[in-house]
Structure formats: structure tokens, C-alpha cells
């Protein structure tokens, strides 16, 4: 049996951090079944629910980010940082990891800074084309930094960078052989072009309102929508009946399979999944994320002629026309599919684990 490792994986806050972390853990266990993995997250955040659901233990730190506006929470921040550093020291001391992996997010900072002080090898995984503040602060302590986009030498030392991509959900690569199953699952017509509209599990209000505003013009094109609105969106959908509207899509593998055009936010995981699957996509980046990193993610693809970008502020007036133009222009659509697939890295989790274990062994 291959050597097993003791691994601490830290970070989270959003699905864009949590799900890659779980994918990396799964790959470590697949390659080194005798390994022991433990997660460290921020109390009250998404990872405290998703990690145990994936079958891993997790410990929580009392930590949060700095509030950009004046807030009483900022006065507690130094106390939280000190508490989290002491807690991190204890976790590392008792667990005795061979190395730690930081995926970004609040908890990654204290845990991995303490690991560096304790001479534990540290590895980072950066999902976005513009690094988060935690990874930028930790970069000088890391042995290797696994990234999803080329050109990251602007932020990290070149000899530390490994272009691996983002680990995507492996079930997306195991789609059924026949599309009929997917059309039937969503009650859609297999003879019509399908537009997949999604804004994440919570939905994206701007995208929903833009689609709703353009329903009549889109309906004239004899196409159908598979529309994930998110659970909180309660707009007036009028006479919408030429497709399927749902708060949440459980079978994303089937949704991607039948999508001729995708309208999506530009979070790191959405970009990675759409790239691997080769989908013609109109990205509507959220302007409400730190460092405007979704716009930077999308611009990287646009510069490679692999996607279309619609500004959030322009969505209501422009998104409908963009959808119609793209669905009508098959050569353009096929070229986008070809170019975005070139940027996809389907074996990211395997490659990340290979980089980490090779470096750790040295």
C-alpha cells in the first residue's frame, strides 16, 4: 500500500473554497487510502456543514474577515486572530500533520501561518485569476501554489507556481450516454435549443431580472430555458411556460449536458466546470465580490476568445440580445466551445495531489 499522509486542510467560507478542498481530500484518499485528513474552518461558515457531510472531521476557529465599513465587529478582530492562532497551534501540535493545504478563506490564515512557524510544509490552492487576500498573505510561506489560470506570476514567485486548474465535481464527467434522459428529467423538448440560466444555489438577482425583462423577445426565438432562479427569488414570471424554472438544480450533470448556451456568474468553480465541459457561455460577473475577482475570471476567458462577458450593470438591457445572437450564430457558438475547452483542466485534483506529495516527499 502507498504511504499514507496526515493532512490538515483549511479554509472555506464559500462553495468556491469548500468544494475544491473536499475534492483534494477525496483524491488524497483515493491515491493514499491509509491517510488521515482533518479540516479546519471558520465557525458558522459553510464548511462546518459541508465537510462533515462529505465524511471528514472538521474543527472550527473563531475567526472572521475585516469589515470594510465601520463596524463594532472590527474591534473584536485582534482578539479573534489571537484566539485562532492559539487554537491553530493546539490543533497542529495534537494532530501532527505531514503538511497543510490552504484553499483560501478566513480559517486558512491563522492555521497556515502557525504551521509555517512550526516548520510544517505549507501548500496553497488558488481558485481565481486574482488571488484572495489570505493566499496573498501566505504566499511567502508556501512551498508550492497550485493555480487555475496562467499569468499568476504577477502575484506569486514563478518557481512556486503550478498550473493545475480547479478540482471540479467528478460526477459532471460521468454524464449519461443519451441526452433523452436529461431532457425527460427537466421536462424539456429535445428538438429545441436550450439556454441554461444559473446564478448559483442562491440565484443571482440581476440575471433573474434581466431574463424576466427579456422573456417576450427570447420566447419568439423558438428556444427553451432551463432557469435556476435560486430559492429566494420571487419575481413575477407572467406567462412563462416554454421551459423549466426551478429554485435549485440537483442534477447539474444533466443540465450541462443539454445546454446549448449557458448564462452564469463567473465564480471560480463555475468557470472551471464550464471550461472542462466546453460550454458556450455568457458570463455576468457579480460586482459584489472582493477585488472584483469574478470580472477578472471572465476577462481571462474573453481575452482567449473563449467566452462572452456581459457587465452586471448592462444585463437588463443587453443580456437578452446577447442570448438571441449567440443561439442564432452556430459558428460563433461552436468556436466558443472549442476555445473554452482548451482552457479546461479536467484532472486538477489528481495533479494538485501529485504536486503536493512530490514536494512533501522531497
Image (tube, helix red, strand yellow):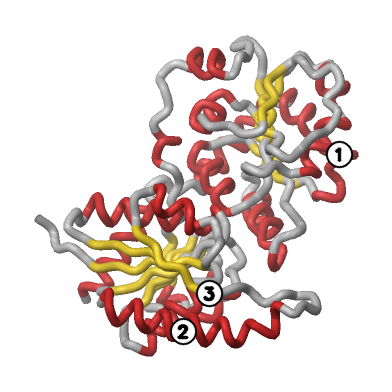
Q: Position of residue 189 (x, y in %)?
A: 63, 11
Residue 321 makes an appearance in the image: no
Residue closest to the eye, 49 or 219:
49
Number of numbered discs: 3
Q: Position of residue 128 (x, y in %)?
A: 57, 61
Q: Residue at x 18, y 63 (%)?
A: 4
Placement of 122 over or under 241, stated as above or below: below
- For label 3, the residue is 62
Q: Residue at x 74, y 15 (%)?
A: 242
**Distance between the Cα atoms at labels 1 and 3?**
44 Å
User: Of label 2 and label 3, which has the lower sequence position?
Assistant: 3
Q: Residue at x 52, y 60 (%)?
A: 127
**Distance between the Cα atoms at labels 1 and 2?**
48 Å
Residue closest to the eye, 265 or 152:
265
**Distance between the Cα atoms at labels 2 and 3?**
10 Å
- For label 1, the residue is 318
Classify mark 2: helix, strand or loop: helix
Q: Quadrant of residue 352?
A: bottom left
Give the label, 2 or 3, closer to the camera. Answer: 3
**Is mark 1 in CB contact (under 8 Å) with mark 2?**
no
In the picture, measured across the screen, residue 358 lies left or right of residue 328, that is left
Give the label, 1 or 2, closer to the camera. Answer: 2
- For label 2, the residue is 85
User: Of label 1 and label 2, which has the lower sequence position?
Assistant: 2
Q: Residue at x 51, y 41 (%)?
A: 341
Give the label, 1 or 3, closer to the camera. Answer: 3
**Is mark 2 in CB contact (under 8 Å) with mark 3?**
no
Q: Residues within 10 Å of mark 3 (few under 14, many from 20)?
A: some
Q: Quadrant of residue 1?
A: bottom left
Residue closest to the eye, 109 or 293:
109
Residue 165 makes an appearance in the image: yes
Amino acid at each position: 500500500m502507498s504511504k499514507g499522509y496526515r493532512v490538515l486542510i483549511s479554509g472555506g467560507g464559500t462553495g468556491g473554497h469548500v468544494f475544491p478542498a473536499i475534492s483534494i481530500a477525496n483524491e488524497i484518499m483515493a491515491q493514499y487510502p491509509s491517510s488521515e485528513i482533518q479540516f479546519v474552518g471558520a465557525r458558522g461558515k459553510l464548511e462546518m456543514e459541508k465537510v462533515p457531510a462529505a465524511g471528514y472531521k472538521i474543527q472550527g476557529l473563531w475567526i472572521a474577515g475585516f469589515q470594510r465599513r465601520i463596524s463594532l465587529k472590527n474591534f473584536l478582530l485582534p482578539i479573534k486572530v489571537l484566539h485562532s492562532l492559539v487554537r491553530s497551534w493546539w490543533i497542529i501540535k495534537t494532530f501532527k500533520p505531514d503538511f497543510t493545504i490552504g484553499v483560501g478563506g478566513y480559517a486558512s490564515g491563522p492555521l497556515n501561518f502557525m504551521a509555517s512557524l512550526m516548520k510544517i510544509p505549507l501548500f496553497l490552492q488558488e481558485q481565481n485569476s486574482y488571488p484572495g487576500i489570505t493566499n496573498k498573505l501566505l504566499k511567502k510561506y508556501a512551498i508550492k501554489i497550485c493555480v487555475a489560470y496562467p499569468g499568476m506570476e504577477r502575484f506569486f514567485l514563478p518557481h512556486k507556481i503550478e498550473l493545475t486548474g480547479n478540482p471540479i465535481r467528478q460526477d459532471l464527467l460521468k454524464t449519461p450516454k443519451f441526452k433523452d434522459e436529461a431532457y425527460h428529467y427537466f421536462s424539456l423538448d429535445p428538438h429545441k435549443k436550450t439556454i441554461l440560466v444559473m446564478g448559483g444555489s442562491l440565484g443571482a438577482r440581476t440575471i433573474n431580472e434581466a431574463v424576466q425583462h427579456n422573456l417576450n423577445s427570447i420566447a419568439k426565438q423558438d428556444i427553451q430555458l432551463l432557469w435556476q432562479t435560486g430559492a429566494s427569488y420571487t419575481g413575477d414570471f407572467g406567462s412563462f411556460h416554454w421551459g423549466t424554472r426551478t429554485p435549485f438544480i440537483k442534477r447539474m450533470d444533466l443540465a450541462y449536458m443539454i445546454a446549448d448556451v449557458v448564462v452564469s456568474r463567473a465564480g471560480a468553480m463555475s468557470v472551471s466546470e464550464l471550461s472542462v465541459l466546453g460550454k458556450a457561455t455568457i458570463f455576468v460577473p457579480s460586482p459584489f465580490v472582493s477585488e472584483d475577482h469574478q470580472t477578472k475570471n471572465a476577462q481571462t476567458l474573453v481575452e482567449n476568445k473563449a467566452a462572452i462577458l456581459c457587465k452586471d450593470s448592462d444585463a437588463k438591457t443587453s443580456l437578452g440580445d446577447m442570448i438571441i445572437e449567440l443561439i442564432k450564430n452556430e459558428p460563433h457558438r461552436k468556436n466558443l466551445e472549442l476555445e473554452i475547452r482548451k482552457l479546461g483542466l479536467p484532472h486538477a485534483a489528481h495533479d494538485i495531489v501529485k504536486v503536493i506529495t512530490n514536494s512533501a516527499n522531497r
